[in-house]
Image (cartoon, grey):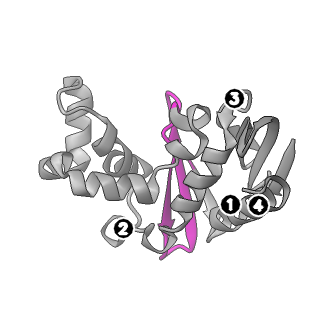
């Protein structure tokens, strides 16, 4: 396994298991405060991972919501993740919790949903390795941190130093370009 970053803070670990033409398959995992985030054993298309990550990083300057700075992880996750993925008629308790944080008009604002997915959602970057966790990344400019929030039956949050995710991700992309031609 190759690693960039510091697993005690934030790191990306990956392994290429096989290659077919310009398509690379393997495993990818984030390390957040010494804890693996994602299914490190899940086979993913690493060439797609690099493409999605490159696109995600292009939205770095937009990855903050001034009106939501300082809000709880529950409120941020409801607005950024659940408003996009939770069906309106899901179950009444979940809908009630969601609408306590999100305006009903925002639940059907498809332009807003597209912006939120492109700018904050990390699901596509790791494919199935991350999709069950629904991770999001938010820049909290007033605190000079990045808030990484995910859900695995419990809502978790890790505070990363400002731009740590972006810097480590850029190192990962540079290594992939050098070693894999991606």
User: Do the residues bearing badges 2 and 4 touch, measured as CB atoms within 8 Å?
Assistant: no
The residue tagged 2 is: 65
First-in-chain label (4 vs 1)? 1
Residue picked out by circle 4:
177
Q: Which mark is residue 92?
A: none
Q: Nearer the viewer, mark 2 or mark 4?
A: 4
Disc 1 is placed on an element classified as helix
| Residue receiving disc 3 | 43
Answer few, some or many: residues within 10 Å of disc 3's Cα (few below 14, many 20 plus, some between 14 and 19).
Answer: some
Q: Residue at x 47, y 67 (%)?
A: 59
Is 150 covered by the magenta stretch?
Answer: yes
The quadrant of the picture occupied by the N terminus is top right
Q: Quadrant of the C terminus?
A: bottom right
* Label 2 residue SS: loop
Q: Find residue 169 and name its label.
A: 1
Task: Give the residues in magenta.
Answer: 132-157
| Position in image of residue 176 (x %, y %) | 77, 56
Q: CA distance from mark 2 to mark 1?
A: 22 Å
> Which of pointers 4 and 3 lies earlier in the amino acid sequence?
3
The CA distance from mark 2 to mark 3 is 34 Å
């Amino acid at each position: 396994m190759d690693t960039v970053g510091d697993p005690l803070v934030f790191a990306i670990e990956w392994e290429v298991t096989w290659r077919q033409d310009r398509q690379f398959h393997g495993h990818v995992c984030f390390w957040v405060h010494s804890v693996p985030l994602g299914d490190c054993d899940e086979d993913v298309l690493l060439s797609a991972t690099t493409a999605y990550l490159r696109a995600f990083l292009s939205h770095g300057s937009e990855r903050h919501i001034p009106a939501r700075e300082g809000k709880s992880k529950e409120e941020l996750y409801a607005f950024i993740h659940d408003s996009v993925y939770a069906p309106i008629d899901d179950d009444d308790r979940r809908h009630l919790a969601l609408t306590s944080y999100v305006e009903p008009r925002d639940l059907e604002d498809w332009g807003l949903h597209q912006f939120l997915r492109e700018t904050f959602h990390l699901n596509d970057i790791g494919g199935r390795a991350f999709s069950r966790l629904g991770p999001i990344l938010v820049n909290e400019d007033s605190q000079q941190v990045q808030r990484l929030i995910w859900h695995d039956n419990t809502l978790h949050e890790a505070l990363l130093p400002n731009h740590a995710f972006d810097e480590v991700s850029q190192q990962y992309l540079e290594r992939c370009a050098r070693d894999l031609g991606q």
